[in-house]
């Protein structure tokens, strides 16, 4: 247990002692509640063998008490702003942190404890009825921000790391309060069903016989037939995301090495995507210079420009899906279909498939797609 004393100035000094530390840790807080909350979490991390570097640097003899770590009354908003300036943040996290600045930006960092985070999550469930995935996105973005602050020595610990597993999942008590709680596992893995791919190709070709069977006079805009077909083929053959595809330029295509080089992806990394013979042949027929899809994107690299192009393409896709009688098929579902086919049609490992798809976390692949390998296991049985 940490020990505490109240200074004459009114601030609280806390001392953490553990055999696993090279010395005592002295911390300064504005209030006793704040001190006890942080010390409980710090001791839990230390006992678990996860000593933050910021805390380890503070472990020193009692004679050095004057050099204590002082938590200032800084807000979450100020920490987020520093993080966005000082670190390469993914586009996804930028969006979520923007949401959090508006929701909880005024909260002082000293109030951010595990208990506070649990209350925030409960509010997301009971009041806003957010899905578990959305909750994880919000908390995950803030956790990475605070991790960076700990690494810089601005915070002793990151209390969000002490949240229990499955914190975003609705428990029975929460489901009893919420009328229509989202499912515990809301990860989407929509596959193409029988006949859907064939119907999509008929729509992309503006097949007159098929359109007549629907009683439709006009199909899709003829000027977008070729680029939308190429977009569809690339999605199915490469497992690339929509934005990764429509921002392609011809200098990213290497026919000799049969690869597509992606300079900027959703998670901020670059990667090389191998091309199947189907894509190589299709691209060779249309090889040119500049952008692959100038009809859909005008090279505007700003987030607003990219969102506008994504919205325009999503609208075109919804028209195609509606005509193909698969209204609930999102364009991003083609990525899931492509990854599933890599599991079903190749012997590549999870790591190799992750290099193609750009997944940083293999657990996502294992959770959503690795079950497709189950049928292959029978080959090893007697």
Image (cartoon, helix red, strand yellow):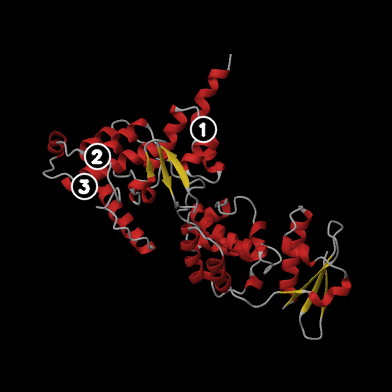
Q: Quadrant of the C terminus?
A: top right
> Which label sits in the foreground, 1 or 3?
3
Q: Do the residues labelled 1 and 3 touch (CB within 8 Å)?
A: no
Q: Is residue 106 above or below residue 284?
A: below
From the viewer's side, name the closer residue of 179 and 146.
146
Q: What element carries label 2?
A: loop
Q: In this view, does 97 lie above or below 250?
A: below
- Badge 3 density bin: few <14, some 14–19, many ≥20, Cα 10 Å: some
Q: Distance between the residues labelled 1 and 2?
A: 28 Å
Residue found farthest to the bottom: 9
Q: Mark 1 points at which residue?
A: 371
Q: Locate residue 35: give its quadrant.
A: bottom right
Q: Do the residues labelled 1 and 2 touch (CB within 8 Å)?
A: no
Q: Locate residue 136: give its quadrant.
A: bottom right
The answer to whether residue 179 is visible is: yes
Q: Which label was assigned to residue 335?
A: none
Q: Which label was assigned to residue 324?
A: 2
Q: What element carries label 3?
A: helix
Q: Which label was assigned to residue 224?
A: 3
Q: Residue at coordinates 53% horizontally, 18% vertically from top-left? A: 379
């Amino acid at each position: 247990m940490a020990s505490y004393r109240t200074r004459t100035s009114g601030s609280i000094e806390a001392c953490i002692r553990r055999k696993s530390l090279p010395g005592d840790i002295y911390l300064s807080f504005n209030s006793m509640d704040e001190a006890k909350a942080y010390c409980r979490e710090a001791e839990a991390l230390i006992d678990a063998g996860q000593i933050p570097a910021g805390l380890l640097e503070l472990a020193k003899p009692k004679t050095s008490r004057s050099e204590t770590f002082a938590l200032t009354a800084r807000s979450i908003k100020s920490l987020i702003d520093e993080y966005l300036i000082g670190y390469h943040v993914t586009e996804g996290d930028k969006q979520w942190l923007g949401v959090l600045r508006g929701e909880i930006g005024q909260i002082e960092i000293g109030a951010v404890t595990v208990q506070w985070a649990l209350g925030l999550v409960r509010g997301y469930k009971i009041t806003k009825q957010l899905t578990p995935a959305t909750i994880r996105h919000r908390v995950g973005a803030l956790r990475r921000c605070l991790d960076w602050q700990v690494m810089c020595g601005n915070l002793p610990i990151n209390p969000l790391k002490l949240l229990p597993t499955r914190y975003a999942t609705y428990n029975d008590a929460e489901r009893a309060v919420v009328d229509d709680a989202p499912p515990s596992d809301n990860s989407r893995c929509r596959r193409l069903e029988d006949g859907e791919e064939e119907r999509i190709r008929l729509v992309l070709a503006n097949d007159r016989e098929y359109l007549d069977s629907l009683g439709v006079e006009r199909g899709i805009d003829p000027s977008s037939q070729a680029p939308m077909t190429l977009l569809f083929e690339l999605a199915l053959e490469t497992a690339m995301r929509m934005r990764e595809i429509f921002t392609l330029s011809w200098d990213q295509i290497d026919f000799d090495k049969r690869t597509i080089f992606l300079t900027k992806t959703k998670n901020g990394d670059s990667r090389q995507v191998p091309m199947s013979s189907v894509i190589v042949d299709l691209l060779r027929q249309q090889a040119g210079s500049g952008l692959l899809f100038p009809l859909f994107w005008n090279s505007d690299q700003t987030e607003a420009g990219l969102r506008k192009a994504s919205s325009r393409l999503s609208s075109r896709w919804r028209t195609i899906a509606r005509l193909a009688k698969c209204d609930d098929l999102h364009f991003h579902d083609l990525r899931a279909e492509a990854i599933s086919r890599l599991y079903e049609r190749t012997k590549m490992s999870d790591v190799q498939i992750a290099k193609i798809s750009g997944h940083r976390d293999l657990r996502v692949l294992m959770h959503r797609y690795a079950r497709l390998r189950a049928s292959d296991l029978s080959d090893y049985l007697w």
